[in-house]
């Protein structure tokens, strides 16, 4: 008996939630267990493996499409989901994921650290588009991992009944002075306060979910509206969708870099398009009217091949290229003519071409089988 597809791990059990858990419950369970299992704080031999398993469970159950497929079939295909996951190429480094976010989270705790950056950093993602999507303009939902404002404390870092108070270590100055005794005398040095990170403020009862930071690692979904005619390498900026700041400080921006995939029929040059158009010898000689598929859906482009068109000749069709970004006009289409020479002709077609060659005075040379018959040829003809 052939077994069905292998069942995945029990993601609900890994997160410690019921099968009817809400999105909020799943998120909180993930935060709680991730803080326990992350290798930066958990030194158990299997901590890293268990954290990866936890991240996989959250990746599936936090996505409605993946969760639905998992609930029905017990597994999730790699192509499931309607979202576009993107690769990072930003200040965090390439391939930044949930595990790295938690490393950043633990490293950015508000206690025991000096010179903590308050404002969130900019983040960058690359977005792949087809040429048809460039021609139409498109909305894309992308999914990426970032430090987002904590929902429990609304980004303040203050827990229930807590408040922001003046730092007792530096008395609100944000700086501390240390004295070293040397043979040259006492030397004073000034540095950021280790208790408040240079802010001069501390929280007497930090939020238990975010450890007083005001932010937590999470999976962000955002819809990007890409304008028509955008070019490869251009960037779109989404304000405040980068890394969240500490204690409600300004968040960074999300920088989306557009990458356009090669097209099978068209090559882009600015707002213009280039394409190869094939014609027969007779069409190129006598001229012809051709129709080809344009870059827009259901668009038919008419191309007038002039009489005596040569191989490699370029025919320009105005306003049939790509839309110009944030304009109503379009670029042009340049059709590069490729004259196709037939490889197989029947007898009548050969006769017509030979007659045309004589009319034009073309010397096509003596072709095999058309010269005077030799003795062996005459014998074969007689026997046949």
Image (tube, grey):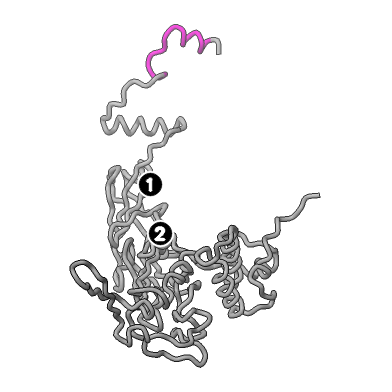
The residue positioned 55% from the left and 65% from the top of the image is: 42
Residue beneath label 2, please?
A: 94
Q: How many residues crowd around disc 2 within 10 Å: few (fewer than 14), some, or many (20 or more)?
A: few
Q: Nearer the viewer, residue 278 or 27?
A: 27
* Quadrant in which the C terminus appears: top right
What separation in Å lies between label 2 and label 1 (alpha carbons)? Answer: 44 Å
Residue beneath label 1, please?
A: 278
Q: Nearer the viewer, mark 2 or mark 1?
A: 2
- The mark tally for this picture is 2
The residue positioned 33% from the left and 61% from the top of the image is: 232
Percent of width and height locating residue 332: 29, 61
Percent of width and height locating residue 141: 47, 71
Q: Nearer the viewer, residue 101 or 187?
A: 187
Q: Nearer the viewer, residue 178 or 273?
A: 178
| Label number found at residue 148 | none
The mark nearer the N terminus, 2 or 1, is: 2
SS at mark 1?
A: strand
Percent of width and height locating residue 85: 48, 64
Residue 300 in sight here: no
Could you say which quadrant of the image residue 82 lies in?
Answer: bottom right
Magenta segment, which residues?
Answer: 369-382
Q: Nearer the viewer, residue 82 or 90?
A: 90
Identify the residue at the far left of this view.
Answer: 184
SS at mark 2?
A: loop
Relative side of 10 to 160, left or right: right
Does residue 381 belong to the magenta stretch? yes
Identify the residue at the far right of this view.
Answer: 1
Does residue 145 belong to the magenta stretch? no
């Amino acid at each position: 008996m052939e077994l069905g597809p292998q069942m995945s791990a029990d993601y609900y059990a890994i997160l410690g939630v019921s099968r009817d858990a809400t999105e909020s419950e799943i998120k909180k369970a993930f935060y709680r267990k991730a803080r326990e299992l992350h290798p930066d704080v958990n030194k158990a031999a299997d901590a890293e493996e268990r954290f990866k398993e936890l991240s996989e469970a959250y990746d599936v159950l936090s996505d409605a499409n993946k969760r639905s497929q998992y609930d029905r079939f017990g597994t999730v295909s790699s192509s499931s989901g309607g979202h576009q996951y993107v690769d990072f190429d930003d200040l965090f480094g390439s391939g930044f994921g949930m595990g790295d976010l938690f490393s950043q989270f633990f490293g950015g705790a508000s206690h025991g650290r000096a010179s903590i950056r308050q404002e969130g950093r900019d983040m960058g993602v690359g977005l792949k588009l087809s040429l048809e999507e460039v021609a139409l303009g498109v909305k894309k939902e992308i999914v990426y991992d970032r430090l987002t404002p904590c929902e429990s404390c609304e980004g303040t870092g203050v827990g229930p009944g807590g408040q922001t108070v003046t730092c007792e270590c530096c008395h609100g100055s944000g700086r501390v002075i240390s004295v070293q005794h040397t043979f040259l005398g006492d030397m004073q040095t000034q540095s950021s306060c280790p208790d408040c990170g240079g802010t001069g403020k501390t929280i007497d009862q930090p939020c238990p979910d975010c450890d007083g930071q005001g932010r937590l690692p999470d999976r962000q979904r955002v819809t990007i509206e890409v304008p028509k005619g955008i070019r490869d390498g251009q960037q779109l900026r989404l304000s405040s969708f980068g890394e969240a700041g500490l204690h409600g400080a300004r968040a960074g921006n999300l920088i989306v870099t557009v990458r356009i995939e090669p097209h099978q029929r068209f090559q882009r040059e600015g707002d213009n398009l280039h394409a190869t158009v094939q014609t027969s010898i007779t069409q190129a000689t006598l001229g012809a009217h051709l129709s080809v598929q344009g870059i827009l859906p259901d668009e038919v482009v008419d191309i007038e091949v002039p009489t005596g068109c040569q191989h490699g000749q370029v025919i320009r069709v105005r306003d049939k290229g790509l839309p110009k970004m944030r304009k109503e006009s379009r670029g042009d289409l340049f059709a590069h003519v490729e004259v196709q020479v037939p490889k197989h002709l029947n007898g009548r077609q050969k006769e017509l071409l030979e007659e045309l060659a004589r009319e034009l005075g073309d010397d096509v040379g003596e072709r095999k089988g058309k010269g005077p018959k030799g003795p062996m040829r005459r014998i074969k003809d007689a026997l046949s």
